[in-house]
Every structure is written in C-alpha cells, then in structure tokens.
Image: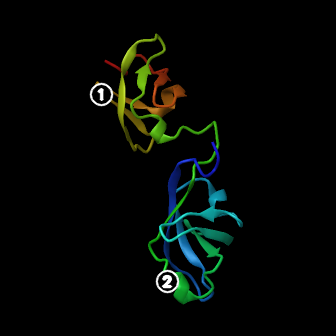
C-alpha cells in the first residue's frame, strides 16, 4: 500500500500563533514526534503543510511551517487539525484494526466480538459484545478486524 492509499490519522492541532515570525504552537496527539521533523508533511482541510523546523516546548511543540512567515498568517491557522498517513509499523496495534474482530482466549474459546475500545489510564480496554472488558496488554496477536488472541489472567471472563 502506498503512502497515498494509507488511511490518515488525526495527529495534532494548531493551538495558536507563537512569536512574530509565523511559528505556531502545536498540540501533538501522537507519541510519534517524527511527525514534526523537518520535511514532514501534515495534511489539513486547507491543504498540506510542510514542517521546516520544530522544537519541544513544555507539553507541546513550536513549529515552523513552510509559507507561514508572519504572525498574521500563523493566526489564520488557529484550531486547524493536523493529519498524517498511518506509519508502517508492525509493532503498533491500530484501534481501527480491533473493531469487529472475534476474541479468543489462550484455550481457543471464543469470548466475543470487539464493539468498542475504551480509554483507560493503565491500558485501553477492548469492549466485547458479551460485556467483557479486556485490557490491551493481554492481546497476543491481531489479525486486523478478524481475530484477536488474548492471554488473560484466570477469572477475567467470569
């Protein structure tokens, strides 16, 4: 699948202009900071933006985009959501790959179908149509949208 065909994900948002030379403050929703590396292209409803420079600033990033060279231009981008193609990374489980998959325990017993994913500080939870909640930390294999194998502690499904 080429970069054009990969689904795009929302990865952040421009909060406001920062400084006088067109930099913006970006809230990055992704843990993949390479999204803001010089040369990276981010997609918006207004068209693509190319990163020329970025630096971490507290919990956010100060970013310079090609073509935004004044504070006035930068202010016009306040609130714009930034998207990017999904990265090719086999070690990552993408949330959209979990929905509608059948969940099987280590003994091969079908435990239900994923109908949702619930955010949880310790580990996001698979929400099954059976009502069971399964922490993602127990997922051993994922066949996107088809099957998920889990190895859970005894008693989780009771």
Q: Position of residue 84 (x, y in %)?
A: 57, 57
**Left of 137 or right of it: where is 99?**
left
* Picture quarter with the N terminus: top right
Q: Position of residue 143 (x, y in %)?
A: 52, 27
- The secondary structure type at the circle numbered 2 is helix
Whether 64 is drawn above or below 41: the answer is: below
Residue lying at 48% horizontally and 14% vertically, measured from the top left = 106
**Left of 115 or right of it: where is 85?**
right
Residue lying at 55% horizontally and 55% vertically, measured from the top left = 30
Q: Position of residue 25 (x, y in %)?
A: 54, 74
Q: Nearer the viewer, residue 100 or 104?
A: 100
* Res. 13 in view: yes
Residue lying at 53% horizontally and 48% vertically, measured from the top left = 7
* Res. 155 in view: no
Question: Mark 1 or mark 2, which has the lower sequence index?
Answer: 2
- Give how far apart the Cα atoms at labels 1 and 2 are: 45 Å
Residue at the spot of label 1: 129
Residue lying at 49% horizontally and 83% vertically, measured from the top left = 75
Residue 110 picture quarter: top left
* Local crowd size for mark 2, using a 10 Å CA cut-off: few (<14), some (14–19), many (≥20): some
Whether 108 is drawn above or below 88: the answer is: above
Q: How is the image coloured?
A: rainbow
* Picture quarter with the C terminus: top left
Residue at the spot of label 2: 75
Q: Nearer the viewer, residue 158 or 62?
A: 62
Q: Label for residue 80?
A: none
């Amino acid at each position: 699948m080429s970069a054009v065909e990969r689904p795009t994900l929302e990865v952040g948002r421009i909060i406001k202009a920062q400084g006088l030379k067109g930099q913006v403050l970006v809230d990055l929703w992704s843990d993949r900071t390479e999204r803001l590396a010089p040369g990276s292209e981010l997609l918006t409803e207004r068209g693509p933006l190319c990163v020329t420079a970025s630096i971490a600033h507290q919990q956010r990033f100060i970013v310079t985009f090609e073509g935004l060279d004044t504070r006035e231009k930068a202010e016009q981008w306040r609130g714009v959501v930034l998207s990017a193609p999904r990265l090719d990374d086999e070690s990552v489980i993408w949330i959209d790959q979990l929905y509608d998959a059948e969940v099987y325990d280590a003994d091969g017993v079908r435990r239900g179908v994923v109908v949702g994913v619930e955010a949880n500080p310790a580990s996001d939870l698979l929400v099954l149509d059976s009502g069971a909640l399964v922490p993602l930390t127990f997922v051993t294999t994922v066949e996107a949208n088809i099957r998920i194998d889990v190895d859970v502690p005894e008693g989780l499904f009771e």
